[in-house]
Image (cartoon, rainbow, N blue to C red):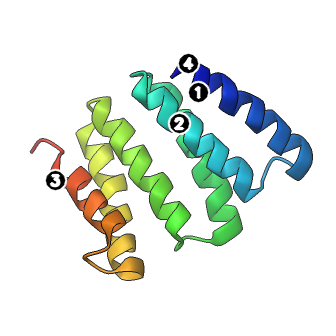
Amino acid sequence: HEKVIEFFDKALSILRDVYGERHPHVATCLNNLGVAWNALDKYEKAIEFYDNALSIDREVYGERHPNVARDLNNLGVAWRDLGKYEKAREYLTVSYKMRVEMLGENHPNTLKAKRNLDSIPK
């Protein structure tokens, strides 16, 4: 995972040089870095990257977009992994509802969001 982080760090630098700070490609790269940090159990670091990705995606796409739902889902997973279940539930609930609305109940991304939501301890 550390090699992946090195790769995405380099990619992020290039994307920022080419497109600027607030471009969707930058948000995707930030999201990917968040995934890598989360896999290394560095949840606070992952949350930082996911928050930045969410900020860009909301600015570019608005509140209702699959990338925004993805970012919210990933934030929810990181908060869950950190043991902050109420915060995780908030993010995952919004992501799930967005995905139901945009993609339908049986879409793989919707089902994934539902599994993540259901994985939060009561």
Counting residues from the N terminus, which is met first, the one under dot 3 or under dot 1? Answer: 1
Residue 61 as seen in the image, left or right of residue 45: right
Counting residues from the N terminus, which is met first, the one under dot 1 or under dot 2? Answer: 1
Q: Residues within 10 Å of mark 3 (few under 14, many from 20)?
A: few
Counting residues from the N terminus, which is met first, the one under dot 3 or under dot 2? Answer: 2
- Residue holding disc 2: 34
Which circle, 3 or 1, is nearer the viewer? 1
* In the rendered image, the vertical position of residue 60 relative to residue 20, given as above or below: below
Mark-to-mark CA distance, 2 and 4: 12 Å
The amino acid type found where label 4 is placed reads: Glu
At x 57%, y 41%, the residue is: 32
- Residue holding disc 4: 2
Where does residue 67 sit, x and y in percent of width and height?
Answer: 54, 62
- Residue holding disc 1: 4
At x 50%, y 23%, the residue is: 1
Mark-to-mark CA distance, 1 and 2: 11 Å
The amino acid type found where label 2 is placed reads: Gly
The kind of secondary structure element at disc 2 is helix
For this orientation, the residue located farthest to the left is 122
* In the rendered image, the vertical position of residue 52 relative to residue 57, given as above or below: above
Which circle, 1 or 2, is nearer the viewer? 1
Where does residue 109 sit, x and y in percent of width and height?
Answer: 36, 64
- Residue holding disc 3: 118
Mark 3–mark 1 CB contact (< 8 Å) = no
Mark 4–mark 1 CB contact (< 8 Å) = yes
The kind of secondary structure element at disc 3 is helix
Counting residues from the N terminus, which is met first, the one under dot 4 or under dot 3? Answer: 4
The amino acid type found where label 3 is placed reads: Asp
The amino acid type found where label 1 is placed reads: Val
